[in-house]
Image (cartoon, rainbow, N blue to C red):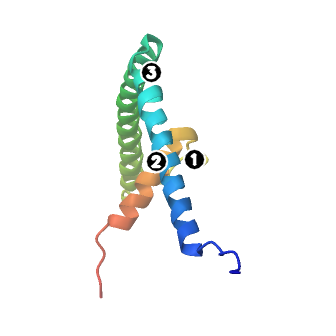
Amino acid sequence: THPPRQPNRQTTSNRQTIMSQFFQRIANYVGNEIIVKGLANSKLFQRFAVRTSSKYEEFSKTGAESLNKAVDEMMKETAAAAAASKGGGTLTGPPKPPLRGLAGFLSAFAKEAKRDFSVRERW
């Protein structure tokens, strides 16, 4: 006598939300319990982590040293060029090509930073 009831759209949406939350919790559990704890107990992964950490520290140290050397060289070259131009002398020989690789990048970066942060008169 009565037509069949249509499912309420809001009820269906709530069920889908609850199911998606349930699957998210399962995925989080699998991620936390199995993967993280498995890696933490793995001797191979521990050795990998220690080696990676030591290599990172080594590269960080050598990177800072090479940066300091590049900046020092750039400052010496700039001072020599400024002294030659003030003294009325000219630089001899053809111009030097720009540095390549990390040293060239750092040199160009330092020059641009110096230009950007130099104090200029505003009037």
| Local crowd size for mark 3, using a 10 Å CA cut-off: few (<14), some (14–19), many (≥20) | few
- CB atoms at circles 1 and 2 under 8 Å apart? yes
Along the horizontal axis of the image, is 12 left or right of 89?
Answer: right
The amino acid type of the residue labelled 1 equals Pro
Give residue 38's mark. Answer: 3
Residue 16 placement, left or right of 51: right
**Mark 2: which amino acid?**
Ser
Q: Nearer the viewer, residue 86 or 55?
A: 55
Residue where numbered disc 1 is placed: 98
Residue at which label 2 appears: 107
* Image: 78 above or below 68: below
Which mark sits nearer the N-terminus, 1 or 3?
A: 3
In contact (CB < 8 Å): disc 3 and disc 2: no
Per the image, label 2 sits on a secondary structure element best described as helix
Question: Closest to the observer: 91 or 5?
Answer: 5
Residue depicted at 36% across the width and 27% down the height: 57
Q: Nearer the viewer, mark 1 or mark 3?
A: 3
What SS does tag 3 mark?
helix
